[in-house]
C-alpha cells in the first residue's frame, strides 16, 4: 500500500520509527522505494551532491521539476517529498505557484526551510491542498546567515524558540517537521511537543523518523563526513542491501547511535 501522510501519523502514534532517504533519479527511487523506505526526499542537496555547488542556493525550480518527474517514475509507493528551492517561497503568492508546479511534477508534499515567518505561507498551502514539511534547525539555505553549517539550538533560549516555532508551524498546518543538526534532547522535546511526525538528521534517535542523503549512507561522501552519517554499504553486499539495513536500523533505533548524535 502506498505511504501517505496518514501512514506517518500512524507510525508516530504507535512509536514506530520510519525512514526517509533522498533520491534524484528513477533508478535510485525504485531501489529506495522497494527497499522499504517510507518517504523519498528530492532534496535541494542535489545542488551539492549532483551539481558540485558548495551550497544548495543555486538550485532552480526547473531542475527540481526535472528530478521530481524522474523520481516519480521510479517510485513504487513511497511518499514523495520535494524541497522548494531558495527564495521560491519568499512570499505566499510565490509559494503557492511554485508548490503547485512541484506537485504537478509528482511531489506529494513540499518542504520549506525557516522559522515563524513561514506561518501564513504554510497555512495558505495547507488550506489549498499542499501538505508541508517545515525544516528547522540547521537550514542549509541560511548558510550565509549562519556563517557556516553549524549545530543549531545549543543554548536554552534558542532551543525554546525552536520549540515555539515548531508548535506554531504545526498549528498553522505543517504536516511534518524536519530537524537538522540539533542536540538530541531538544529534538526529543520537539517530537513530544507536536502531534505532527518529526523527521531528524543529526538530531538523535528519538525523532519519529530519520533521513539521510542516499550518497552519504552508501559511503559516497566527498569532503568532510558529517558526524551523523553512517556508511551502510560497508557491511552490505549491494546498494539495495545497504538501504534495507538502513531501514532496519532506523526501525529498531540502532541508528542513529551516540556517535552520530549531538548531545548539547
Ligand atoms: O536537501 C536535502 O537532502 C535535505 C535533507 C538533508 C534533509 O534537505
Ligand atoms: Na534540502
Image (spheres, rainbow, N blue to C red):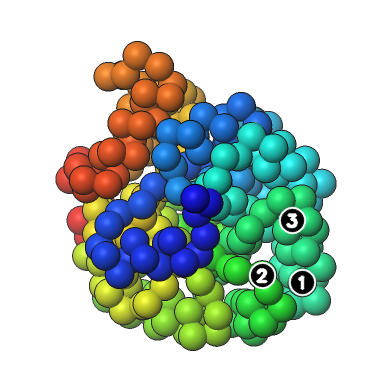
Residue 261 rendering spot, x and y as whole percentages? 25, 48
Q: Is residue 156 above or below residue 228?
A: below
Asked whether the residues under the numbered discs 1 and 2 touch, taking CB atoms below 8 Å apart as contact, a structural biologist would say yes
Residue 249 as seen in the image, left or right of residue 3: left
Please, what secondary structure does the residue beneath circle 2 have?
loop
Foreground pick, 213 / 239: 239
Residue 51 rendering spot, x and y as whole percentages? 68, 32
Foreground pick, 124 / 84: 124
Residue 60 as seen in the image, left or right of residue 17: right
Q: Is residue 214 above or below residue 166?
A: above
Q: Which mark is residue 130?
A: 2
Q: How many marks?
A: 3
Foreground pick, 113 / 153: 113
Residue at the (82%, 46%) spot, across then down: 62
- Neighbor class of circle 1 (other Cα within 10 Å; few <14, some 14-19, many 20+) is some
Location of the C terminus (image quadrant): bottom left
Q: Which mark is residue 96?
A: 1
Residue at the (34%, 61%) spot, across then down: 11
- Neighbor class of circle 3 (other Cα within 10 Å; few <14, some 14-19, many 20+) is many
Q: Which mark is residue 102?
A: 3
Asked whether the residues under the numbered discs 2 and 3 touch, taking CB atoms below 8 Å apart as contact, a structural biologist would say no
Foreground pick, 11 / 88: 11
Amino acid at each position: 500500500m502506498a505511504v501517505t501522510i496518514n501512514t506517518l501519523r500512524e507510525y508516530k502514534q504507535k512509536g514506530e520509527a520510519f525512514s526517509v532517504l533522498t533520491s534524484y533519479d528513477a533508478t535510485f527511487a525504485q531501489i529506495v522505494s522497494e527497499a522499504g523506505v517510507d518517504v523519498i526526499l528530492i532534496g535541494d542537496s542535489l545542488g551539492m551532491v549532483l551539481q558540485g555547488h558548495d551550497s544548495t542556493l543555486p538550485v532552480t525550480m526547473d531542475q527540481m521539476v526535472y528530478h521530481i518527474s524522474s523520481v516519480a517514475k521510479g517510485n513504487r509507493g513511497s511518499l514523495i517529498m520535494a524541497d522548494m528551492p531558495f527564495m521560491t517561497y519568499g512570499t505566499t503568492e510565490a509559494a503557492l505557484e511554485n508548490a503547485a508546479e512541484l506537485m504537478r511534477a509528482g511531489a506529494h508534499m513540499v518542504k520549506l526551510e525557516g522559522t515563524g515567518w513561514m506561518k501564513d505561507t504554510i497555512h495558505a498551502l495547507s488550506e489549498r491542498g499542499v501538505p508541508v514539511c517545515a525544516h528547522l534547525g540547521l537550514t542549509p539555505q541560511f548558510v550565509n546567515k549562519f556563517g557556516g553549517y553549524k549545530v543549531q539550538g545549543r543554548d536554552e533560549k534558542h532551543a525554546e524558540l525552536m520549540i515555539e516555532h515548531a508548535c506554531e508551524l504545526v498549528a498553522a498546518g505543517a504536516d511534518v517537521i524536519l530537524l537538522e543538526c540539533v542536540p538530541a534532547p531538544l529534538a526529543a522535546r520537539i517530537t513530544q511537543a507536536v502531534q505532527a511526525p518529526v523527521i531528524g538528521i543529526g538530531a538523535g534517535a528519538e525523532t519519529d523518523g530519520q533521513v539521510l542523503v542516499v550518497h552519504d549512507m552508501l559511503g559516497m561522501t566527498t569532503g568532510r563526513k558529517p558526524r551523523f552519517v553512517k556508511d551502510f554499504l560497508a557491511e552490505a553486499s549491494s546498494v539495495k542491501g545497504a538501504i534495507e539495513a538502513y531501514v532496519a536500523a532506523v526501525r529498531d533505533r540502532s541508528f542513529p547511535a551516540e556517535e552520530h548524535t549531538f548531545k548539547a
